[in-house]
Image: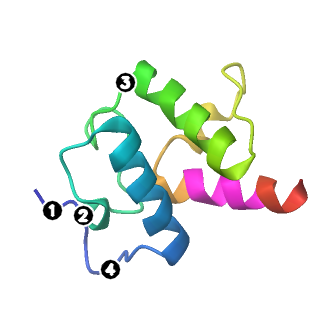
Amino acid sequence: MNTNSSTAAQTPFEHEVAENLVQALQLEVAAEDIAPDAPLFGEGLGLDSIDALEIALLVGRDYGVTLKSDDPDNKRIFGSLRSLCDYVQAHRAAA
């Protein structure tokens, strides 16, 4: 299943994070097939709250960015691959 569109290509960092997500969550989709703006949860990749915890652990371990379960921005942060990557890059640079 190809969820990528030619109008929204992954940046190199988005591809790196997508590869890490595919590996960590054992997704049955290729990293390059994850559209940057597609939802990660629900209709998109179909991830759930356990996957969100795994993503938070991965981001903390690999990028040194802490994602808190009570952050009011979590819906936006976890909204798509692109929004997750934007958040990680912004907060990694600030650290």
Q: Position of residue 16 (x, y in %)?
A: 48, 64
Measured Cα–Cα span from mark 2 to mark 1: 5 Å
* Horizontal side of residue 49 vs 84, given as left or right: left
Q: Which of marks 4 and 3 is in front?
A: 3
Which is more N-terminal, label 1 or label 3?
A: 1
**Marks 2 & 4, CB-CB < 8 Å contact:** no
Packing grade of label 1 (10 A; few <14, some 14-19, many >=20) is: few
Q: What residue type is labelled 2?
A: Asp
- The answer, for residue 39, to whether it is visible in the render is no
Which SS class for mark 1? Answer: loop
Measured Cα–Cα span from mark 1 to mark 4: 13 Å
Q: Mark 4 points at which residue?
A: 7
Measured Cα–Cα span from mark 2 to mark 3: 19 Å
Which is more N-terminal, label 4 or label 2?
A: 4
Measured Cα–Cα span from mark 2 to mark 4: 13 Å
Q: Mark 1 points at which residue?
A: 2
